[in-house]
Image: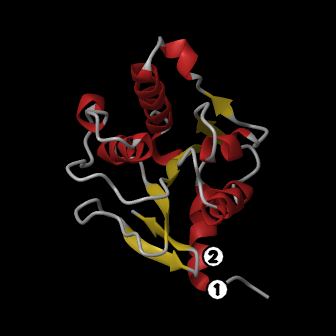
Amino acid sequence: MPAPPPVSAVAGLLRSARVVGVSGSRAASPGCLRAVTWAVGQLASGATVVTGCASGIDRVARGVPSALVFRASCFGRGRGSFARRSTAVVRHVAGAGSSALWVSAPGRACPRGLVPSPSSSACFAGFGSGSWASLALALGLGVPALVWLPSGVTPPQGWGLGLVCAGRAGAWWGT
């Protein structure tokens, strides 16, 4: 039996991307983990997954054989190394142009005041969520995105994210 059209639309976007950045919550809920595990399973053979070194969603992405992992330890010490690592991941994906896609599962609502921007210093300015900051930078750089949010959480207005597919545990939103 074929998948319902909205799920097919999400799968089609995932299959068409060649360079896919993946980020999200370090303490992801089971629904969030299932959604991202499903998403990376939809990627075309030969697609490259680009991710960080954190637990949670990054760990799921690192399980993909083609994963290119950016480690915070390569970007200095302290909390700033994680922001520099995340910026490098987003910029690497953005460099793929029209074959790029950003997949994000932040697991909670966006911090107030954060907006998409091509400036990493504007996105990583102490808002308290590296996942949302990475998504803001990706969108600011023009990278198309798919975002999984748990039920009851919606993306901020003005981010250009519309509902693609909803289920009991959460929904996929996309550009």
Residue 126 image position (x, y, % from top left): 28, 34
Where is residue 62 drawn, in percent x and y? 71, 38
**Secondary structure beneath label 2:** helix
The residue where tag 1 is placed is 4
Q: Identify which amino acid the numbered label 2 is placed on.
A: Ser
Left or right of residue 62: residue 157: left
**Label total for image:** 2
Query: Which residue corresponds to the image point at 75% horizontal and 43% vertical from the top-left?
Result: 64
State the colouring used for the structure image.
secondary structure
The 10 Å Cα crowd at callout 2, few under 14, some 14 to 19, many 20 or more, is: few
Q: Quadrant of the N terminus?
A: bottom right
Question: x%, y% of residue 173?
Answer: 45, 68
Which residue is label 2 attached to? 8
Q: Is residue 103 left or right of residue 8?
A: left
Classify 45 as above or below 127. below
> Compared to 134, does 6 lie above or below?
below
**Residue 93 bears which disc, if any?**
none
Q: Position of residue 10 (x, y in %)?
A: 57, 69
Looking at the image, residue 76 lies above or below residue 41: above
Give residue 3's quadrant in the image: bottom right
Circles 2 and 1 in contact, beta carbons < 8 Å: yes
**Is residue 47 in view from this perspective?**
no
- The quadrant of the picture occupied by the C terminus is bottom left
